[in-house]
Image (cartoon, helix red, strand yellow):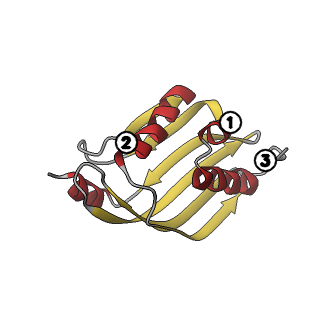
Amino acid sequence: MTATPQTTREVVDAFFARFAAGDLTGLLDLFADRVDFLVPGAPNVPWTGARSGREQIAEFFAVLGTALTPAQEFTIDATIVEDGHAVVTGRSRFCVLSTGRSFLNEFALHFTVADGRIVGYRMHEDSHAISAAFAA
């Protein structure tokens, strides 16, 4: 059995490990019951917007799985942790299933962690490149 992550760094590392493994149940276990969750972006990108509960967060990850191919590239460049905050920078490349268009996404993801759970999630991504990949 995997130990329950407690520190901010452990929670963030577990998030990416579970995301990479496609472990949605394990991923959702890392979130608090209520989360300040926001992915700003263009309205034609189906996962953008605000969410708060685990059910809405589950829908977010489900949309990623139905809209995109598995990652063609996923690299974490840096993880910076201070107290209950972590910022992760990196890049990813996916293909939009409905258009066949790929996009390179340079991102910064800000996590807020309290009591071993994610209570804040802010994804800052290349919304222009992603929106263009979704355009028909």
| Residue located at (65% from left, 33% from top) | 32
| Residue located at (65% from left, 53% from top) | 85
In the displayed structure image, the side of residue 36 where residue 63 appears, left or right: left
Q: Which residue is mark 3?
A: 5
Q: Quadrant of residue 69?
A: bottom left
- What type is the residue that disc 1 sits on? Asp
x, y percent for residue 102: 30, 63
Question: Which of pointers 3 and 2 lies earlier in the amino acid sequence?
Answer: 3
Q: Residue furthest left?
A: 136
Q: Quadrant of residue 71?
A: bottom left
Residue 47 - label = 2
Q: Which residue is mark 1?
A: 29
Q: Is residue 85 above or below residue 113?
A: below
In the displayed structure image, the side of residue 92 where residue 110 appears, left or right: right
x, y percent for residue 38: 44, 42
- What type is the residue that disc 2 sits on? Trp
Count of numbered badges drawn on the protein:
3
Q: From mark 1 to mark 2, how far is it between C-alphas?
A: 20 Å
* Tag 3–tag 1 contact (CB < 8 Å): no
x, y percent for residue 36: 53, 36
Question: Which of pointers 3 and 1 lies earlier in the amino acid sequence?
Answer: 3
Q: Is residue 116 above or below residue 136?
A: above
| Residue located at (37% from left, 42% from top) | 47
* Tag 1–tag 2 contact (CB < 8 Å): no
Q: Which quarter shows the N terminus?
A: top right
Determine whether the residue tagged by mark 3 lies in a helix, strand or loop: loop
Q: Which is more toward the observer, 79 or 5?
A: 5
